[in-house]
């Protein structure tokens, strides 16, 4: 993979005893991110680079390149000593790889964002989901606990899905009642994190983040699936959009705002757990109204309900109470629902226009669904 520096973790050769060390560069904080190729990983990397961090990301082996969301940040480590983002192979299912990178990079902060993060798919692959989401977090916590460097700060990507059927508004004190293998695994990861804080004094925080979206959202989550379809329908590449339950309500925010809250948690004097949410909730149907309406289309002319997208057990209504994050961290969202939908639709209209050029030139089949 062209984007991976296989050797970036080594500390490099030590200086011969008679050589004077070069002047020290200003001390940079080192962050290690799992799930760096995902939506949040890419925004967090941008944010931390902007703060002057050296960012190391763990990526898993794939038969295709998986670094599209990071390409604009990439500097080839062979050509430049200025590369401040470095990628290394590891996997949340492989404890030895996690331990090796924690031990060799000695990070100041670790952000555990890696997950099989699709709720519906977790019903299809429950065992794998538990291994990566729950035991993966445990493996990483163990690697940090046993590292020679003390004081490493840990962020665990928790989810509003953990509240499941507990009615809104949901806060840090609301009961967890998970409704999917994904959510149950996230609950386990949450409690592992609390336990490592209590048992070993690790600076470990759980962010309980409500849904957050962006133009970089994975294309099989409902918001992006809708905005991709709006773009393609608008330029004539698609006519129908197949969806499941339209009545579920979610508290949707902008991913760029949410990664800032992750960082803020690790800058506090004491570790803690925080709900991060806009405190505004909308149904999937309202998202459809807003997205199709933005480009003058009526969603009812295009949406077809397909049973395959219903889940064995659903989370009906999520709306966060983020009072603690707002008071203690001083965090608040900058992007509201209408602006978020507009941002995603506008971006996907541009993408569809580029797709149309390829279709018209015969390089792509219009039926090829994204
Ligand atoms: P994405 O699905 O976009 O990204 C998931 C990341 O995890 C990808 O980089 C993926 O790599 C990586 N990954 C998956 N399996 C493994 C594995 N076995 N080993 C190493 N890496 C792996 O998720 P988001 O960015 O949206 O979310 C980030 C985190 O926050 C996730 O843990 C998610 O569950 C959680 N979360 C997300 C919310 C949201 O609304 N977005 C809300 C609350 C929590 P690859 O690119 O190779 O697939
Ligand atoms: P969610 O997001 O399950 O909340 O998990 P998703 O966008 O998948 O579903 C939201 C709601 O939309 C309904 N829905 C559909 N969903 C999908 N994916 N596809 C469809 O065709 C469709 N039709 C209706 C769903 O039933 C659901 O009610 C996301 C993920 O990012 C998790 O990792 C994260 O933890 C939570 O958000 C917070």
Image (tube, rainbow, N blue to C red):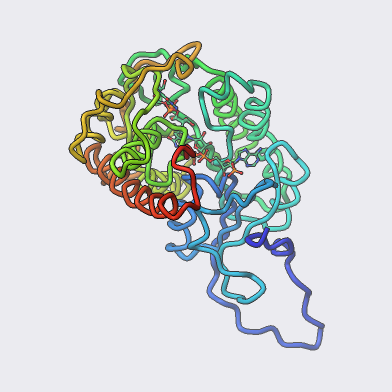
Ligand 1 is found in the corner quadrant, namely: top right
Vertically, is 20 above or below 347? below
Quadrant of res 74: bottom right
Quadrant of res 88: bottom right
Q: Quadrant of the N terminus?
A: bottom right
In the rendered image, residue 7, in percent from the top left (x then y), is placed at 74, 64
In the rendered image, residue 137, in percent from the top left (x then y), is placed at 63, 35
Vertically, is 168 above or below 234? above
In the rendered image, residue 352, in percent from the top left (x then y), is placed at 37, 47
What's the residue at 55%, 28% (across, down)? 190
- Is residue 177 something that shows in the picture? yes
Of residues 90 and 366, which is closer to you in this image?
366
Vertically, is 189 above or below 330? above
What's the residue at 26%, 46% (across, down)? 334
What's the residue at 47%, 40% (across, down)? 370
What's the residue at 63%, 28% (across, down)? 134
Of residues 65 and 50, which is closer to you in this image?
65
């Amino acid at each position: 993979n062209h984007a991976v520096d296989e050797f970036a973790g080594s500390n490099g050769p030590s200086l011969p005893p008679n050589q004077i060390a070069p002047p020290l560069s200003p001390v940079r904080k080192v962050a290690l991110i799992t799930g760096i190729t995902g939506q949040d990983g890419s925004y967090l990397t941008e944010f931390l680079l902007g703060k002057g961090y050296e960012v190391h990301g763990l990526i898993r082996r794939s038969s295709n390149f998986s670094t599209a969301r990071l390409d604009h940040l990439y500097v080839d480590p062979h050509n430049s000593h200025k590369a401040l983002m470095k990628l290394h192979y590891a996997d949340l299912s492989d404890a030895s790889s996690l331990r090796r990178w924690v031990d060799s990079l000695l990070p100041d902060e670790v952000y555990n964002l890696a997950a099989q993060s699709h709720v519906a798919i977790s019903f299809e692959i429950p065992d794998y989901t538990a291994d990566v989401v729950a035991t993966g977090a445990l493996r990483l916590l163990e690697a940090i606990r046993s590292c020679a460097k003390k004081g490493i700060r840990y962020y665990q990507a928790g989810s509003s899905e953990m509240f499941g059927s507990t009615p809104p508004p949901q806060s840090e004190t609301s009961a967890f009642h998970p409704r999917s293998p994904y959510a149950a695994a996230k609950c386990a990861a949450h409690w592992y994190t609390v336990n490592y804080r209590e048992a070993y004094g690790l600076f470990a925080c759980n962010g309980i983040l409500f849904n957050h979206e962006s133009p970089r959202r994975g294309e099989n989550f409902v918001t992006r699936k809708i905005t991709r379809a709006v773009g393609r329908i608008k330029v004539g590449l698609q006519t129908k959009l197949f969806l499941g339950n339209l009545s579920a309500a979610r508290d949707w925010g902008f991913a760029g705002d949410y990664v800032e809250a992750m960082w803020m948690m690790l800058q506090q004097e004491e570790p803690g757990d925080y709900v991060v949410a806009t405190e505004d909730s909308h149904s999937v149907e309202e998202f459809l109204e807003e997205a199709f309406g933005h480009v003058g289309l009526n969603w009812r002319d295009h949406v077809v309900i397909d049973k395959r997208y219903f889940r064995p057990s659903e989370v009906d209504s999520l709306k966060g109470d983020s009072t603690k994050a707002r008071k203690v961290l001083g965090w608040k969202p900058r992007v509201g629902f209408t602006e978020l939908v507009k941002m995603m639709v506008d971006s996907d209209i541009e993408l569809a226009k580029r797709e149309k050029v390829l279709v018209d030139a015969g390089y792509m089949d219009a039926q090829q669904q994204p």
